[in-house]
Amino acid sequence: MDSKLVIGNWKMNGRTAANQALVAGMLADADINRAGVGIAAPDIYLSQLATMLQGSQIAVAAQDASRFAADGAFTGETSAAMLADIGCRYVLVGHSERRQYFAEDNAALSAKLQAVVAAGMVPVLCVGETLAQREAGQVEAVIGQQLEALAAINGQHYVVAYEPVWAIGTGKVATIEQIDEVHKQIRAVVLQCYGASDSIRVLYGGSVKADNADAILSLASVGGALVGGASLEVNGFGKICQAAKKLI
Ligand SMILES: O=C[C@H](O)COP(=O)(O)O
């Protein structure tokens, strides 16, 4: 039986010296330095991260991959093959911040998912509704539409992360009931439509902190956590990883 998966997403944060100190602290923490934990750094720092994590059990993750699979004239892009080349194991796809700022639609996300799987990595498809969509009673429809990108990798190995946009970076974490309801919906849809197995992990993300991680990760429907702000500090991240040691 595996522990619940925790991926720390640094987002657009980091500098070489600070990364060195942060990762050294994580490697020294047995709750973090174990299978079932990953760190997603900005592309520019992934080689530094991979070097520091070499020989440890912590997985290297990327925050995105190009929708273009083949090398070529795509200035500024990082291909899935390049991410695999430096040792990435997971790749976030369709994070709400990328959907918001870079207009990533299901067509682009489908190409990204296919490129990540073709390169031998595990995509983490991020889905989640805005507050306006929740208040309009559109959660099920929005999540269902976002999950349709998985048709491109039907039956392959992937992870889904549910991140209510209104809970990201706000400190306003979704209630246990809200999390459980959407996670059960996602599991039902991917099992029915997208070739997932019972081992599919659905991570929760959105203001996960040391003081709420235990309650969230105790839910059977929650297969782990996608952690933003709290992943930039060793002690808090370590407490979240400790809570995730529950068997699934
Ligand atoms: O990728 C992480 C999620 O966006 C959650 O971020 P947060 O933990 O800072 O709310």
Image: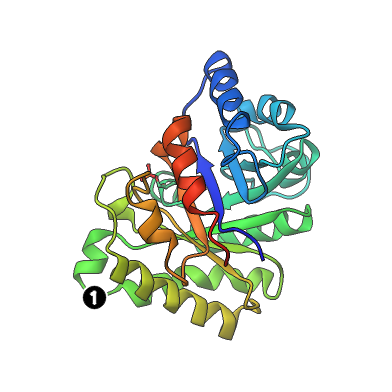
Ligand 1 neighbours mark 1 (CB distance < 8 Å): no
In this rendering, position of residue 217 left or right of residue 28: left
Give x and y (percent) for residue 128: 39, 61
Kind of residue indicated by mark 1: Gly
- Quarter of the rendered structure image containing ligand 1: top left
Give x and y (percent) for residue 89: 71, 48
Above/below status of 231 relative to 221: above
* Residue in view at x 35 percent, y 67 percent: 179
| Most foreground residue, 173 or 210 | 210
Quarter occupied by the N terminus? bottom right
Give the labeled residue for mark 1: 137
| Most foreground residue, 30 or 208 | 30
* Residue in view at x 42 percent, y 52 percent: 96
* Residue in view at x 30 percent, y 69 percent: 178
Residue found at the very far left of the displayed protein = 135
* Residue in view at x 78 percent, y 54 percent: 120
Above/below status of 200 relative to 39: below
Q: Secondary structure at mark 1?
A: loop
Name the quadrant containing residue 217: bottom left
